[in-house]
Image (cartoon, rainbow, N blue to C red):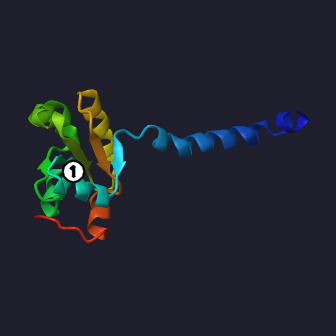
Amino acid sequence: MKFFIDNLFILAIVLLSGGALLWPVLTQRGKRATALQVTQLINRGKATIVDVRDPAEFAKGHLPDAKNIPLAELDKRIGELEKAKSKSVIVICQSGARAATAAGKLEKAGFTDVHNLEGGIAAWTTAGLPIAK
């Protein structure tokens, strides 16, 4: 017990840093999907692709048939995706961070099968998969 009292400050730092490392994993919204899993969903024809990057980023290259709805506009444009509630929705951004936020918003709006592309468009291009411009 004396050890814990003498090293209380160090133990607090360890617990705080551990919590900070776990926070992104615990707050991840939507299912995470690899590029291969996303490709399979697209090939089955049961997926709607939503790219939440800014229009300038979207214009540089995006997944074929992706719909561009920037994250900042998602709340007011979510009605455009009503027909996709019965399908899988794949949310994509540059690295996966914005897509996680968008996946949370879609889940709150009633979308039941939301997938976040792990690694974003960067992982997609690294895997050598097709990009439309």
In the figure, residue 75 lies in which quadrant?
Answer: top left
Quarter containing the C terminus: bottom left
Residue drawn at 14 percent across, 38 percent down: 84
Looking at the figure, which quarter contains the N terminus? top right
Residue 81: percent from the left, percent from the top? 13, 36
**Residue furthest front as drawn:** 44
- Residue at the extreme bottom of the image, as rendered: 128
Please report the residue visible at 27 percent of the width from the left and 40 percent of the height from the top: 114
Q: Residue 27 at what x, y percent from top left? A: 44, 37
Residue at the image position 26 percent from the left and 59 percent from the top: 121
Does residue 47 sit above or below 75 in this rendering?
below
Q: Which one is in front, 16 or 29?
A: 29
Within 10 Å of disc 1 (Cα), the crowding (few <14, some 14-19, many 20+) is many
In the rendered structure, the answer to whether residue 108 lies left or right of residue 58 reads right
In the displayed structure, would residue 123 be above or below residue 107? below
The residue most toward the right is: 2
Displayed quadrant of residue 72: top left
* Quarter of the view holding residue 112: top left
Q: Is residue 80 left or right of residue 130?
A: left
State the SS at label 1.
Answer: loop
Q: What amino acid type is highlighted by mark number 1?
A: Arg
Name the one closer to the observer, 25 or 115. 115
Instruction: Where is residue 82? Give x, y as percent.
Output: 12, 32
Q: Which residue is mark 1?
A: 53
Residue 10 locus on image (x, y percent)? 75, 43
